[in-house]
Amino acid sequence: MERLDELLARHHAVVEEAVARHGLPLHVFFVEEMERTAAEFRDVADRLYPNTSVLFAVKSNPCRGALRAAARLGLGTDTASEHELRAALEEGVPPGKIVCNGNAKSTRYLEAIVQSGALCAVDNEDELDELSRTAQKRGARVPVLVRFRGMPLSGFTTDDQATASDWTKFGFPIDRADEVLARVADAPGVKFDGVSAHIGTQIAAPLAYERLVAHFLGLARRATARGLRVSRMDFGGGYPVSFVSEADWKGFMRLLLARMRDPGAAASVTWNDLPMGYFGADPDDPDPAWTGKAYWSERPGAQMLDHLLTFRHPDGKTTAEHLSDLGSPALIVEPGRSLMAPAGVTLAEVRGSKEVLGHRVVSIDLGITNHGTNLISPDIFPAAVLPRRASDRPVDAFLAGRLCFTGDMLSKVKVRLNRAPRPGERVVIYQTGAYSADHFASNSCGFPRPGKVAVARDGHVEIWRRPETFEDVFGPLDAQ
Ligand SMILES: Cc1ncc(COP(=O)(O)O)c(C=O)c1O
């Protein structure tokens, strides 16, 4: 968090001005952090496999400002809708650097894909048929990637966010790859360019990427055997963020396990005593496996791309060597979270504290709808009470949101705060630059969505999303 603390200190005056102008809560993004994370991906690619395109997954921070920054950094985009595609094109992302994903693409989206010349990650047969008809009508030949599922890739994140294993709505089943590839090859108006998949988000275990790559090399060989040229391989996103330090992560796992083994002797560390990644594990097992989402990774961000390219396959070759044997297809990576999360903080106000079953619960003026960074299970993250003081004494607390249901717990694991906050004090939640401001943002309980501002290296502040007003949510008094 040191880097974000340093940025908050360096840009203190403009951040305070933004708070005075737009109110709390407020999402604050530091563009130079995005420049740093993007440079890390580019550096790994240039060193290990230069024929790599780094694409910003727009869904992680969908707004013009982020797209402008991405275009300036030479990034392409992974888009999830006709709207993200339009904004990417309008902000100057070249169509050849855009991959269009989605399992229920609208007719408008497909037409925009054909018209723009962007790459389409084809999800299913109906979509392939419509894309083929649309392309023929326009006399175009659309480059496509074929998206696959059905790989042994469950258990690496939450089930809701696993997108290349068996139970997922995305893509074609890999065990029917020959038939699917033949259909794509025969579809008029469509040009087979390669294969794609996205494991899911916050994939902390290197093994997941190893499995994905192994399956993709097999797919590429099968496609080549059919006479198809695999000119691109898209490994999707999922690159993890270490939201907490290794020591804090492992310490938390130890405490959780101690509580599961002997609830009488050890205090609970999770809300409702949730077993989280130890769900279904035998607590007497000396070293039970953690399943699902993890909040620390030995290979965060671009380091996971490094691993993906350098790990040794059973035949002793690295992925980069295998790709070279396949004629050096372009590699596509689509980071969202790891590119954006480290660049953002969310500022909010403490409204009060109480004790629940002996645990400190601090309520703040956000909802889980304004903290989608962890998506669906807003679990573990660092936060602090500002300003920090020499007299601070750390406390552990669950952070609660302001929405009208019990599930609105911003943290389901106790957060260590630098001090017990008083009502009206400011809290900062770190690493919220991906998903937090947008993914589940809604007007639940009538709250307007908070603003989102970006601070450039020179201290210039851009509004990435104006805070909504009462009228935005409820309309004017005389509306019919
Ligand atoms: C196809 C695709 N690519 C990339 C991403 C970005 O994932 P992450 O933010 O975990 O890097 C997503 C996220 O859902 C996705 O669906």
Image: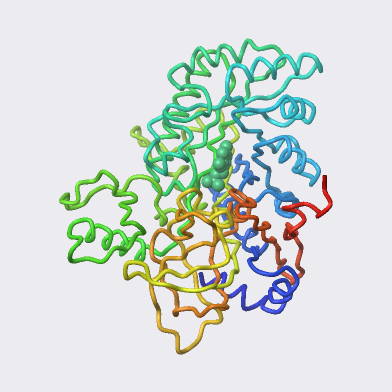
Q: Residue at x 57, y 66 (%)?
A: 365
Quarter holding the C terminus is top right
Q: Is residue 48 above or below residue 226?
A: below
Say whether residue 333 is visible. Answer: no
Q: Residue at x 60, y 69 (%)?
A: 347
Horizontal side of 447 relative to 315 (left or right) equals right
Quadrant housing residue 397: bottom left
Horizontal side of 194 relative to 416 (left or right) equals right
Residue 477 in the image: state x and y as whole percent: 81, 55
Which of 81/309 is in front? Answer: 81
Q: Residue at x 43, y 56 (%)?
A: 379
Q: Is residue 206 above or below residue 9?
A: above
Say whether residue 96 is visible. Answer: yes
Which of 349/52 is in front? Answer: 349
Residue 123 in the image: state x and y as whole percent: 58, 25
Q: Is residue 236 above or below residue 139?
A: below
